[in-house]
Image: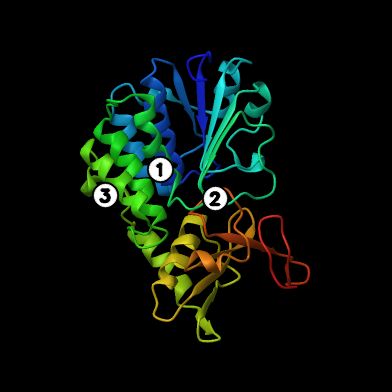
Amino acid sequence: MVRDSENVIIMGHRLADMDALGAAIGMRRAVRELNKEAYIVLESVNPSIERLMDRVRREEGLIGWFIGPDEAMGIATPLSLVVVVDTHRTSMVVEPRLLRQTSRVAVIDHHRRGEDFIADPTVVYQEPHASSTCELVAELLPYFHDRVSLTVLEATALLAGIVVDTKQFTLRTGARTFEAASFLRRHGADPALAREWLREDLSEFLEKAELIRNTVILYDRFALAVADPDRSYSQLVIAQAADTLLEMGGVEASFVAAERPERENRHQRPLHRKRQRPADHGGGVGGADISRTRRRKSTGRWRKSPVGCAKC
């Protein structure tokens, strides 16, 4: 399918995280092994991928393959192949219009199938038991070329995506995860560089600490943190706070309710797969085990939303 396409356009979900971006970079390498043009669609750079994108800008020739949504629409044709990574929901991709430009659509994702699945994809590689989309892409690479050649940046970006979604190989990790990591290490992945890309800024750490300070433990096993109503926090900080709460002894699931600059929502991360209810939203932004709810401001009560479940 790649060989028969005029070009390949790769995109993940909005507010790209390390798994989405690493998977996109890995898929671009796979396509280039077949001597086809491949572009990565990115609408903006957020704090979670800022250090990696700084390195991309310094990598000769690579930044030119990153394009915005409007530019992607300009080069897309009916013979283009659109590859969607780390989500399968139409509403979450960077540019939904691309899915209507061509009938050639491939989906690579590790989230459980949810609502709003991309209509009539040509190929679907969806493995909910995988740790991350980067793991799936690492497994696919040898099928594109038996002697695939990765740069240090490409291999490390894929490794960083696995590290983020497994919380440094502690969650959702199986034999295939370590095999993928070993493959990437053999092809030049640098764990020290990945760690550098994932380091927190002091300002983010202090914001996270402020959120966690308001935590209460419910039923001896659930951690609930509710932010001050006059403060707003980025999605990255909210997700990091939820992750940190899971590190506390006896905590099985963490809940963080906070105002985001554009809307209010709640992040929830169960500790194990068997505790994945409310259902995950099926589209990236921090791993397979996240669901969200939104609060109705007029009443202050929680309501059911398209991306999660909650009590009213």
Residue at the image position 49 percent from the left and 38 percent from the top: 44
Q: Secondary structure at mark 1?
A: helix
Q: Is residue 289 above or below residue 119?
A: below
Q: Secondary structure at mark 2?
A: loop
Seen from the viewer's position, the closer of residues 173 and 305 is: 173
For label 2, count other residues whose C-alpha is less than 10 Å away and answer few (under 14), some (14-19) or many (20+): many
Which residue lies under the disc numbered 2?
111
Q: Which amino acid type is shown beneath numbered disc 2?
A: His
Q: Which amino acid type is shown beneath numbered disc 1?
A: Cys
Q: Quadrant of residue 59?
A: top left
Q: Quadrant of residue 255?
A: bottom right
* Placement of the C terminus among the 4 image quadrants: bottom right
Q: Secondary structure at mark 3?
A: helix
Which residue lies under the disc numbered 1?
134
Q: Is residue 139 above or below residue 230?
A: above
How far separated are the C-alphas under marks 3 and 2? 27 Å
Coloring basis for residues: rainbow
Residue at the image position 61 percent from the left and 28 percent from the top: 122
Q: Which mark is residue 196?
A: 3
Q: Earlier in the sequence, mark 3 or mark 2?
A: 2
Count all numbered tags in the image, as a single digit: 3
Residue at the image position 21 percent from the left and 49 percent from the top: 192
Q: Is residue 297 above or below residue 195?
A: below
For label 3, count other residues whose C-alpha is less than 10 Å away and answer few (under 14), some (14-19) or many (20+): few
> Which mark is nearer the camera, 1 or 3?
1
Residue 146 % position (x, y): 30, 25
Q: Earlier in the sequence, mark 1 or mark 2?
A: 2
How far separated are the C-alphas under marks 1 and 2? 12 Å
